[in-house]
Image: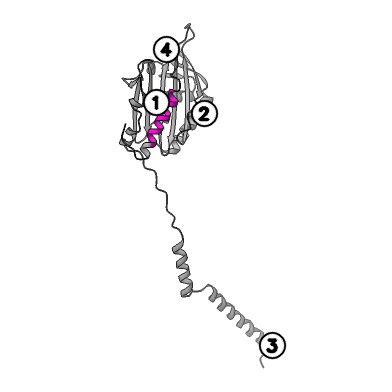
Amino acid sequence: MPRPAARALSVAALCAVLLVSVTACSSGARGPDADASASAAEATRPAVTASPAPKALTAVQAEAALLTEADMGEPWQPTRGAATWHDGVLKAKADTPACQRLLDALYADEPLGRPQGTQAVAGFDDVDGAAQLRHRVLSPRPADVDRSLAWMRGMADDCARFTATTTRHGEQSVQVREVALPEVGDARQGLRIVFTGPDDYDDPPTLTLDVAAVRVGADALTISTGAEGTLVPRIITRAVEQAVGRLEKVHDGHHARA
């Protein structure tokens, strides 16, 4: 008869062999039925596809999205050049760097920063009131537009009041506040900037400038309008509504200017 210790060792060895066999059966190669089930599950799993990146506006589309003389109506006509107040007032030095950036953006008509890629511009003169309006359509990166809109929003606090020194019209007291825009597009910001001339005038001259920027999908537009004294009521609101409507029509495939 085998010794008890040897018998116990044999039983332990047998159990180890059985355990390895069971594990191999549970985790080893699958049979035909298991392979078929896995293939069916893989076939029914929905494919993950990346969303296509939005296409930038073409030059023709950007031009089609611009406001027209018919949109503006009387007494607006295609511009004949920059107004005298453009260089006389907007070309100035601010008393703080933050407000200097605002002045530079107003002078260059670039509230969203220097345009990159496709853009188109239209300008109009109000022959009765010596006002001007400029409309720009462009295709910057949406994240850059949103950062610029946030910067514009901050100007109403950071540069609510400051002094600008011009070469032609002396020191100007400048006030900046937000302007409410219609709920159009995906993101928007409006500012009103009022320049008031030197105090040595009995009735100091003023320049009023409204600036609006709107992101519409992956594209954007800006509108600026200014006049000595006061602006035509709601001109910025009406222009923004029409401009966004034209850009949305371009997005929908209607490219012809009408």
Pointer 1 residue: 109
Q: Sequence order check: which comes first, mark 3 or mark 2?
A: 3
- Say if mark 1 contacts mark 2, CB within 8 Å: no
Q: Which mark is residue 169?
A: 4
Residue 256 image point, x, y percent: 31, 35
Left or right? Give the position of 67 relative to 192. left
Report the mark closest to the observer, 3 or 2: 2
Q: In which image quadrant can residue 121 be found?
A: top left
| Lower position in the chain sequence, tag 1 or tag 4 | 1
Give the Cα distance between marks 4 and 2: 27 Å
Q: Nearer the viewer, residue 82 or 237?
A: 237
- Which is nearer the N-term, disc 1 or disc 3? 3
Mark 4 or mark 3: which comes first in sequence? Answer: 3
Mark 1 or 2, nearer chain start:
1
The number of callouts visible is 4
What residue type is disc 3 on? Pro
Name the residue at 39% across, 30% down: 243
Q: Gap in Å between the C-alphas at discs 1 and 4?
A: 20 Å
Residue position marked by numbered label 2 in the rendering: 154
Which residue type does callout 1 highlight? Asp
The type of residue carrying mark 4 is His
- Give the residue type that dot 2 points to: Gly
Q: Which residue is mark 3?
A: 4
Q: Between marks 3 and 2, how big is the CA–CA gap?
A: 90 Å
Q: Nearer the viewer, mark 1 or mark 4?
A: 1
Numbered disc 3: secondary structure: helix
